[in-house]
Image (cartoon, coloured by chain):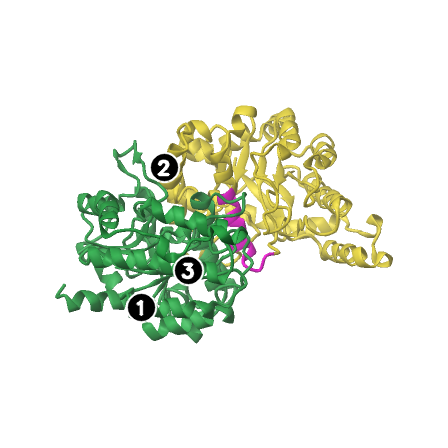
Chain colours: A yellow, B green
Amino acid sequence: MIIDIHGHYTTAPKALEEWRNRQIAGLKDAAQAPKISELQISDDDLRQTIEANQLRLMKERGADLTIFSPRASFMAHHIGDFQTSATWAAICNELCFRVAELFPDHFIGAAMLPQSPGVDPKTCIAELEKCVKEYGFVGINLNPDPSGGHWASPALTDRHWYPIYEKMVEYDIPAMIHVRTSCNACFHTTGAHYINADTTAFMQLLSGDLFKDFPTLKFVIPHGGGAAPYHWGRYRGLAQEMKKPLLEEHLLNNIYFDTCVYHQPGINLLTDVIPVKNVLFASEMIGAVRGIDPQTGHYYDDTKRYIEAADLTAEERHMIYEGNARRVYSRLDAALKAKGR
Amino acid sequence: MIIDIHGHYTTAPKALEEWRNRQIAGLKDAAQAPKISELQISDDDLRQTIEANQLRLMKERGADLTIFSPRASFMAHHIGDFQTSATWAAICNELCFRVAELFPDHFIGAAMLPQSPGVDPKTCIAELEKCVKEYGFVGINLNPDPSGGHWASPALTDRHWYPIYEKMVEYDIPAMIHVRTSCNACFHTTGAHYINADTTAFMQLLSGDLFKDFPTLKFVIPHGGGAAPYHWGRYRGLAQEMKKPLLEEHLLNNIYFDTCVYHQPGINLLTDVIPVKNVLFASEMIGAVRGIDPQTGHYYDDTKRYIEAADLTAEERHMIYEGNARRVYSRLDAALKAKGR
């Protein structure tokens, strides 16, 4: 079985964006604020957007199951206040839940949290609990920078985030560290802010000792870990100067990298440098890079091709495609086993 | 000949730091402000710090010449106002000039600019001109984020920076895009801010069309280009979606990457993905990562070893060590030729 741990509902029906635009307009002019009930998306609408897009490509490429979360770039945690984010997160998570209900063999949910800049993260717990208990979601996306490119929150090692971590440990769910659209004109969203955030989060975790407090906490750093694997020698050296344990011991019982690296040499480096047990298959399809690579004639984000061509044994490939995902996302494993998969 | 294009005077005599601390204290209490003449560093002081450190390691490792600029992390452009930066830059550049005078076979200068947040970059021109004309410097360091991690300046493609670019073109000197110490607690300086800045700068240049206005402008993106080579497929794909030319044509006549990547797999990827004509030898020694890699028994930043072990022809290695540096830093080439080298 091939599990893609990183997919967002980037193809949601247009009605969702229209409702969101009205919600944003309503922040200035309450008369324009829509009711939740005014958002009407039918099961057929959902089926259509999935069958024509993600599910079609999964079948073409040979992926079986996607861990599916709301569109990252649309999370826009900085808009409005906590209540704005809470309503928006609830709507987006529910849509992913409905997709998982409609295509139970192919999608399972991961939650966006109703984060809001400067607001205590424990306000996110209710949505998190609903998504895990009622929706059967198997992970969350955690945004280390709700400001969207101004980086005004404490580092991930700060006690600020502990309420979330306590719940993650209680439910044994991992968090993917994932920012959303950049509001800072210096940072292109998918070309700089995403990759920088991955690198920043990795370095925050390296600099601290968070996993002494939470030995079973699990983070997935997407986009192949940002710059971390490419600069693995730098990070080993910096850890050494900080008198930290070797990275294998210091971080790699708790941190995992996905395979959203869109060319063969990058995947080769990732699987060469990072222990295979820490690499999880993903494509972030349909996402930032949607074109066909003229050098290969295949989609840039068809990452399965790179894993197939990498210097890996069949057993290692199985770990990347399925084994690691079942271990890291234990609730996914339980859900699959309950269905005899 | 082996030319290391990226060295900072990280080992300057303690008196420099003490003078700087007094300068900073003087911003609050003018009585504490030191005169420039109170900074006294003898030639012997300079000789000692260089002979015991950079020059010793260059000889041990087999590098002949280093392009030498003031310590990047100490540039601290956010401190005080333009005049504060102007005085500080003048002092730091003069020290590098004196080192180059004392060791003319081994060091040649590159300038730090007296940037200051919110101040027009053209205020840097006088220092730049002095360094090129009087000191014989062959390049500059340009900080895309004088705020130090708050990213409040326009992108590098903005006309804001054009006065610097016009001078760079006039003198045919390249700029290394190099930030300094992070004032934002989210970003570790050498583990996140440096690498993020490289990635950010690359993406800014990719998103724009700066080299249409300045076809001969040259930038060096240090630290192996941040995350760019590792995610080269992502960047090729993003450029494609933006209807830009292929990266070879769009950027690689103007952008170069150094080899400050501190492990073999990273250098292998860099030299595999990026055309050899765009890769310049560098170590940033003595810099961020000073230890010995237990996996190899050699210094992490002894990057010559990785170049030696990479899959390159003798001709390609010569380009990385010398040929590219002479082409990109044309004033270096002229200075060497004037000495019959």
Relative depth, front residue between A105 and A168 = A168
**Magenta segment range?**
A184-200
- Left or right side of B102 for A316: right
Q: Using the rendered view, name the quadrant where residue A312 is placed.
A: top left
Q: Secondary structure at mark 2?
A: helix
Label 3 and label 1: CA atoms lie apart by 17 Å
Residue type of the residue flagged with mark 2: Gly
Vertical relation: A139 (above or below) B84:
above
The location of residue A341, given as percent across then percent down, is: 58, 29
> Is residue B320 visible to us here?
no
Vertical relation: A54 (above or below) B154:
above
Vertical relation: B137 (above or below) B50:
below
Magenta: main secondary structure equals helix
Q: Which residue is mark 1?
A: B132
Report the residue that reaches farthest toward the left: B340
> Is residue A161 visible to us here?
yes
Residue A186 belongs to magenta span: yes
Residue type of the residue flagged with mark 1: Val
Q: Which residue is mark 3?
A: B87
Q: Residues within 10 Å of mark 1 (few under 14, many from 20)?
A: some
What is the number of the mark on residue A237? Answer: 2
Write down the chain letter for disc 2: A
Q: Residue at x 50, y 71 (%)?
A: B159
Label 3 and label 2: CA atoms lie apart by 34 Å
